Image (tube, rainbow, N blue to C red):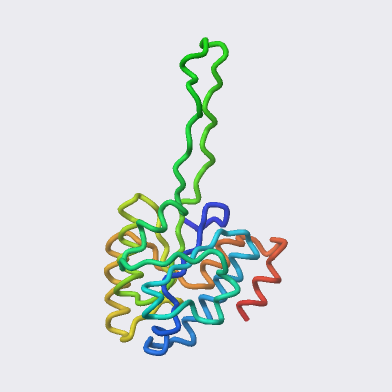
Amino acid sequence: MLLAAEDSQLVLVDYQQGLMPAIHEADAVVANAVRLARIAGLLQVPLWATEENPAGLGGTVEALQPLVAGRVVSKMAFDATEVLLPRLKPVSKGQGGNARSLPRHLQKAAPAPEPGRESLVLAGCEAHVCLLQTALGLLEQELEVWVVTDACSSRSERNRDAAFDRLAGAGAELVTTEMVAFEWLRDAEHPRFKDVLALLK
């Protein structure tokens, strides 16, 4: 099973100014988050970002701010599922008005909902807390969850690796930034291939 750009959404979890200085390999993790966000923009993959208790941990790191502007959701719960779900999986609205009062031949069929983008590509910090709990929450909603391991971390390697073990056991797919990029592209003849390749080099 491969990722498809047209079925995907990208969720960046808590890359915050007050948190990242304590994160293991923070510079590499943020660099990969920036790559993911830019690639999502090139390939028209919707993007969301979360901030845990921004009053205490600060806003999103400067490198990501222009890429997530207007797409940031604040939260206090470690699991962001509740605040993300209305954005990731909007409820389709039925037909308005009292259609039953019309004769059957005048009633319009309710429009079919558009197919959802139910492959959620997640990356973030801390891997064993907010990223893990959000991923597990989204899996409970029967969404596909793909965790980008080289764009995730914790304060310690042990906590990060324990999170990956648990996520894999729960049914999340573990991938890397380059795996996501090339699966979204699928083809060297993709019109944005060279642009994406330049971000990966």
Q: Residue at x 33, y 70 (%)?
A: 130
| The one of 58 and 109 positioned closer to us in this rendering | 58
Q: Position of residue 102 (x, y in %)?
A: 52, 13
Q: Is residue 171 above or below residue 31?
A: above
Q: Residue at x 47, y 54 (%)?
A: 87
| The one of 198 and 50 positioned closer to us in this rendering | 50
Residue 199 occupies quadrant: bottom right
Residue 82 occupies quadrant: bottom left
Counting labels gives 0
Q: Position of residue 24 (x, y in %)?
A: 38, 87
Q: Position of residue 157 (x, y in %)?
A: 32, 85
Q: Is residue 66 above or below residue 1?
A: below
Q: Residue at x 51, y 75 (%)?
A: 33
Residue 120 occupies quadrant: bottom left
Q: Position of residue 135 (x, y in %)?
A: 35, 63
- The quadrant the C terminus occupies is bottom right
Left or right position of 28 against 154: right
| The one of 130 and 185 positioned closer to us in this rendering | 130
| The one of 5 and 137 positioned closer to us in this rendering | 137
